[in-house]
Image (tube, rainbow, N blue to C red):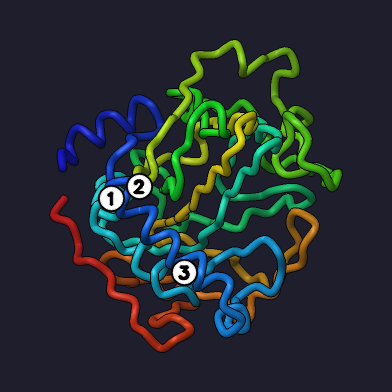
Amino acid sequence: MDLENDRKTFAERGYMGPFTLWEPEEMNRWWKTQRRELLDPANNARKVFDNPVNYDRHLDIPGLSKLITEPEIVRRMQAIIGSDIFCWRTEFFPKNPGDTGTGWHQVETYAIGEATTGMLDATDRSPEAPMELTCWVAFTDATRENGCMKVIPGSHREWKYDERAPMEWNGSARDNSFFGYNYDDIKLDKQWDPDQENVEHLEMRAGEFFIFTARCIHGSNPNVSNRQRMGFAIRVVPTHVRVYGGMTEFDEFGHHFDLSRHGCVVVAGEDEYGHNRVRSENAWGEPFTPIDRLAM
C-alpha cells in the first residue's frame, strides 16, 4: 500500500483507485451471504431507517459492519482526511438492466434537493483535506455496459454546481437526473457541458473499490446489459465534522427518515470532539472495532 502515491493521485484527480479488496470469487461468495442476511425478516426488523432506500445497513448486517472497517479501505481514507474517521452513512447502489444513467452531480455538505442546509458541517477544517470521502465498492462487476461509475478527473478543485440551491424532486430516475433531482438546474454556468470534459469510466471487477470526494463531479452510465450492477457506498468524515447537526428527521428522494436510531461509527482512531451520537455496536450487540491511528 503506497499511501504517499495515493495522496498525490487523490490531490490531482479527486479520486484514487480502483484497488483490490477481494478477488471476484471471494466477493461473489461474500455477497451471496449478505443478500441472504438482507432478506432475513429478523434483520429487517432491526433496520435503522424503515424505508426502501436501505441506508445504513452496516448497523444491522454483520458482514457490512466488518466491511466498513477493512484496513485496505480505511488506511487509504486516513491518508487523505486524517487518522480519526467516522462512517456516517452507507448506501446500496443497484442498477438493473434497462436502468438509466445517473446524472452528473457534485456535493460536499449533502444539501440535496429541497434542503438548503447541509447534513455535514466541518468544525475544524483543513484546506489541504476534504471534509468527506466515499468508498464505492463493487459487489458485482461494473462495466460501461451495466452502468459503471464515471468521473471528471480534477473537477474537485472548482465548483460547477450550486450545492445549496434548492431543487424539486420529480419522482423519477430519468436520464441526467440524480434519483429524481436534476442537477442541470443548479449549474453555475448553464452553457457548460460536463460530457465534453475528460470523462473517466471506472470499470471494476467484483471486489474492487475506489475512493473519491463527492466534490469530484461524478455520475454513472445506463445499464444496457442483461446483468445487474451492484455497488455499495461507504461515506466517511473526519470526527470533527458534525453530522445531521440538530436534525431529528429529514426528507430525501421522496422518503422520510427518522434519525432517532442513527449513530456514527468510529472506523479509525477515536472521537475527541463529541459532536455526534456514536454507535459502538451493531444491532446484534457486536462491537465495531476501529483500526488504530495512522502515523501521518
Residue under pointer 3: 58
Q: Residue furthest bottom?
A: 285
Q: Nearer the viewer, residue 92 or 181?
A: 92
Residue located 60% across and 29% down the image: 221
Q: Position of residue 193 (x, y in %)?
A: 66, 15
Q: Amino acid at mark 3?
A: His
C-alpha gap between disc 3 and disc 1: 18 Å
Residue under pointer 1: 22
Mark 2 nearby-residue class (10 Å; few <14, some 14–19, many ≥20): many
Residue located 34% across and 36% down the image: 18
C-alpha gap between disc 2 and disc 3: 17 Å
Mark 1 nearby-residue class (10 Å; few <14, some 14–19, many ≥20): some
Residue under pointer 2: 207
* Residue 5 in which image quadrant: top left
Q: Position of residue 138 (x, y in %)?
A: 43, 45
Q: Nearer the viewer, residue 45 or 244?
A: 45
Q: Amino acid at mark 2?
A: Gly
Residues marked 2 and 1 touching at CB (< 8 Å): yes
Residue located 57% across and 40% down the image: 227
C-alpha gap between disc 2 and disc 1: 5 Å
* Residue 16 in which image quadrant: top left
